[in-house]
Amino acid sequence: MRRALPRRLPRTAAPAHHEIVASYLARLAALNHLDGDELWKSVSVPGPTAARRIVTAERMSALTGRPAEHLAGALPELRATAEHWPLFRHRPQPGCPRCDARHPGGPVWRILPHHRYVCTRHHYWIGPPDNDSHGPSLRGNREVIAAQRKHLRLVQHFGPGATYDAVLTAFMICAHRWEIFRPTSGLHRQQQIWRERSFQFMPAGAELSSFTASKLFACLYPEAVDLAPLIAAPRWRQFAASGGDQLTRFVAEVRRRLRDHDYQPQAEQDAIAHWIATDCWRPPTTPPNTFATARGNRKPSQVGRMKLPSAERTIRSAAWFALKDRRGMGDAVLHHVTLRPVIIREWSPDMQEFRGAIWNSQRTDKRFRQPQSAN
Ligand SMILES: [Zn+2]
């Protein structure tokens, strides 16, 4: 027999954009002094397992009094097709604090699109999820805000798939470059810019309390987005793969975009050379996980409870960070789970440890063993 639809709640609220259903239900439950998981049962039907009940738009609509299409527009889980899942990060996170504050009933957990790093309305960092707190304000960081606008143009121009691969690859390249101990003069300037930004997000003396790896992504974001078009554009990929004059033109464009006129592909400590030799002629890497296949975060009692794989590392990096006078910060970025898909690609050799994969992603075996081969 078909179960009756749930009764409409006395107090309802609008869902936030890209909010997960469990977060929305937790807020509705709090507003009405109800149990969130009971509410979840009332709007869902049995799924493949007891923990995998399926929330239906029809039942959510009855509960909230809002049209099903309106709900599906905000809540990706209620959409009829699965095509949109690769566009989103798989882990829910808090969004911009000012956007979240508009929604009553408790914390708002969203799955943000891969290309969302900055709230362009309120100027807050909403980059890769890290320690589940809100990101920093970007007041005074105009170049970080401008990078988000450039990033959106990349999505329009190259599509979300190529942009996903290009921006993560560029982050990885910049993170490796932050690690280079004897930089060229252009790289030295870049490292100083990253270091200055790190003081804005994590003031001196407050490193242990203010450190998150996500903020280090914010330090690198403008330069990563400047480099990304070279990695996304099919023409530049072809130039990089061809060798000869075309490779020379590609290297000249790398120098221009990095503002590093001494850049020359090297066999070691050079993630760009690695990308030229190993990745540019292969298809862009796609997101390995989606929210649809990830575990947890389905019922209200699970929201925000997922154990973070990087939590312990974050603390260790923080201590190191404080001690080392802000050197070697690229390492915390490289270890962040966000970069894993471009550090271990489908064709990467098997490495026992992730550290080995990171090492491999900045070197080449044969090409560029002769330092001048690209000129
Ligand atoms: Zn906002």
Image: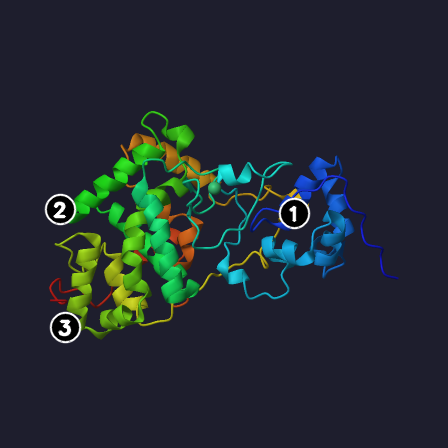
Q: Nearer the viewer, residue 49 or 359?
A: 49
Callout 1: SS: helix
**Residue 348 placed where, x, y %?**
37, 64
- Foreground disc of the pair 2, 1: 1
Amino acid carrying label 3: it is: Asp
Q: Nearer the viewer, residue 271 or 239?
A: 239
- Please give left or right for residue 357 compared with residue 38 in the image: left
Tell me, for residue 185, which label it has, or none: 2
Callout 2: SS: helix
Residue at 20 percent of width and 66 percent of height: 250
Amino acid carrying label 2: it is: Ser
Residue at 28 percent of width and 35 percent of height: 326
- Please give left or right for residue 193 compared with residue 313 in the image: left
In this picture the colour scheme is rainbow
Residue lying furthest top in this view?
205
Residue 201 seen in the current view: yes
Tell me, for residue 95, which label it has, or none: none
**Residue 42 placed where, x, y %?**
78, 50
Picture quarter with the C terminus? bottom left
CA separation, marks 2 and 1?
50 Å
The crowding category of the residue bearing disc 2, from other C-alpha atoms within 10 Å (few below 14, some 14 to 19, many at least 20), is: some
Looking at marks 2 and 3 on the same chain, the residue that comes earlier in the sequence is marked by 2
**Residue 53 placed where, x, y %?**
72, 56
Q: Which residue is mark 1?
A: 22
